[in-house]
Amino acid sequence: MSTPGPPKLRLGISACLLGQEVRYNGGHKRDAFLTDTFGRYVEWVAVCPEVEVGMGTPRPPIRLERRGEETRLVMPSTGEDYTDAMRAWGQRRVAALAAMDLDGYVLKKDSPSCGMERVKVYPDREGAPSRDGRGMFAEALMERLPDLPVEEEGRLNDPLLRENFIARVFVHHRWREGEKAGWTRASLMRFHERHKLLLMARNQNGMRRLGRLLGDSGKGTPVTDLAAAYRQGLTEVLRRPATRRGHTNVLMHLAGYVSDALDPADRAELTETIERYRLGLVPLIVPLTLIRHHVRRQGVEYLQGQAYLEPHPYELMLLNHV
């Protein structure tokens, strides 16, 4: 019997990143990693706010402008103001996306509609723009779906941010599967146990807080309230990428489960490999592959179920670069 492959994920994306010619100049910003590599595991839901709100292609550029205390979305060359139209359309579009079981979203950086952060905002008088804006559609998306993993394609060029985003996407998918089945206290505890080491690598104190949240909750606490509180805490912990120090702590923790059954040579090899990772001499995949080998050979059931050992498909090679 063949082993089932990873789940097919559904993610929203700025349409230009898929190669659709929807940019203001009639061009695109196709991203090969997203389309060709990650795309093998993804059903993309393409969105171009500017086209869908009624702007043509090609079109004059738009930008964010600060007018007093308010930020407006305008087309400087024509004087047209798209703020109200974009906000009304954005609310409807995000409501439709919320019903589509998305597991993440990839936005176009620097876009006045899609930029996640550091978007230029121009002053209402002459002067240099500030870099403190957020695209108008991106703002509506992130306000409506605060737990959805969201990233910009530019930030995904950073190996740490790329790995963390895709790990979050798979965690989000597993969370949704739990929601569909209906959360119970027992299933929330199982979910936490499966992701314990993934959380530990990012924030050990955060992982412990989530464990206490589940352990200390009284039987009178509604499961829906418990799940909501856990989900909020889970999102906060996973937003921060794991550090080399965090991964090293988890690797040493994992080694404690298998070391006693190893002969001296294998034990020394494992210790040395983890140390090489700590020093930055080898990527994470090297000690992790060795630990996976010992876990399988020894049949350590608790570790075999840990998401940390396989947070995303091996073929993505994300752990080769962190």
Image (cartoon, rainbow, N blue to C red):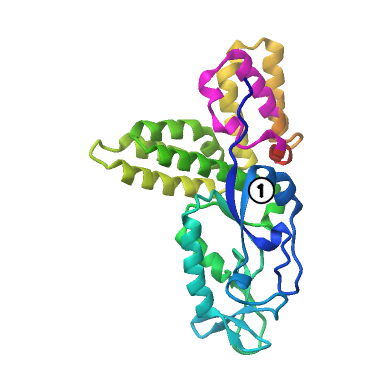
Is residue 321 at least partly visible in the picture? yes
Which of the 4 quarters of the picture holds residue 130?
bottom right
Task: State the residue in front, 203 or 159.
Answer: 159
Figure disc tally:
1
- Quarter occupied by the C terminus: top right
Quadrant position of the N terminus in the picture = top right
Q: Is residue 287 above or below residue 168?
A: above
Name the spot of residue 309 as percent of width and height, x first: 60, 30
Q: Is residue 236 above or below residue 71?
A: above
The structure residue drawn at horizontal position 74% and vertical position 60%, both measured from the top left corner, is: 19
Say left or right for 212 vs 44: left
Residue 112 in sight from this viewpoint: no
Residue 8 sits in quarter? top right
Disc 1 on helix, strand or loop? helix
Q: Please, what is the dominant secondary structure of the magenta stretch?
A: helix
Q: Position of residue 69 (x, y in %)?
A: 48, 82
Query: Which segment is the magenta one?
Result: 287-315
Residue 312 is covered by the magenta coloring: yes
- Answer whether residue 301 is magenta in the image: yes
307 left or right of 322 in image = left
Quick one: 16 or 125, which is closer to the camera? 16
Extreme-left residue of the structure: 220
Question: Amino acid under label 1?
Answer: Arg
The answer to whether residue 80 is above or below residue 159 is: below
Q: Is residue 156 above or below residue 298?
A: below
The residue nearer to you, when weighing 81 against 228, is: 81
Judge left or right: residue 249 versus residue 290: left
**Which residue does the numbered mark 1 point to in the structure image?**
162
Give the left or right position of residue 112, taking residue 194 as reference: right
- Residue in the picture at 76% in, 68% down: 27
Could you say which is closer to the camera, residue 190 or residue 99? 99
Give percent across and percent down for residue 17: 70, 59
